Amino acid sequence: MTGTATARAPETEARLEGPPPRIMVVEARFYPELADEMAAGALAVLKAAGAVSQWFRVPGALELPAAIAAARLRQPDRFDGFVALGCVIRGGTDHYEHVCRESMHGLTGLAARHGLALGNGLLTVAHLEQAWSRARRGEGDKGGDAARACLRLIALHRALDRM
């Protein structure tokens, strides 16, 4: 294989050039204690990055894409990125499958269609213990991971804009 070697950016934190990023964080509050833990992880990452964040709460996972779509439709340039936080825990019916599929489809569809810097922190888990393991800041820190993903995508967007 031939080609030109290029430098790779470090895999740790995104380097954001320019103004502080403006982030919309949407929390699904169906499991309030889990939502609080994930929000704390996301907030720590966003504060460390100097981001300006606005927080919105929705009842559950199905409302996450609708909230982000509403923000994009009404004020398309207000936010540089989005963080979606929530949790769906498997129950005894197939409702879990529908909620997970439609919520994830809505979030990934928005990101792809509109080129959004969207950090997806929607947990889809088998049971409550698994949810806590993934949500806790000292363990999975998926709230922090979603915020980091959003910031990395904003850094990518800004790098592309400078090309």
Image (tube, rainbow, N blue to C red):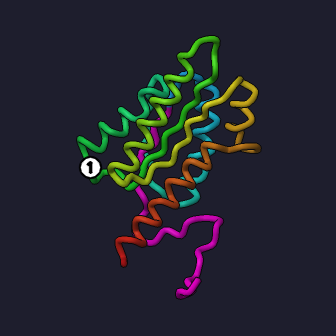
34 and 100: which one is in front?
100
Q: Is residue 99 above or below residue 117?
A: above
View extreme (left): residue: 74
**Picture coordinates of residue 71, whole percent (x, y):** 31, 41
Q: Is residue 127 left or right of residue 102?
A: right
Q: Residue at x 58, y 74 (%)?
A: 9
Residue 35's image quarter?
A: top right
Q: Secondary structure at mark 1?
A: loop
Residue marked by disc 1: 76
- Residue flagged by tag 1: what amino acid is it? Pro
Highlighted range, magenta: 1-27
- Tell me: residue 91, above or below residue 10: above
Q: Residues within 10 Å of mark 1 (few under 14, many from 20)?
A: few
Residue 28, x across and y down, in percent: 50, 29
On-image quarter of the C terminus: bottom left
Which residue is at the far front?
1
Query: Relative to 97, is 52 on the left or the right?
Result: left
Q: Quadrant of residue 24 in the image?
A: top left
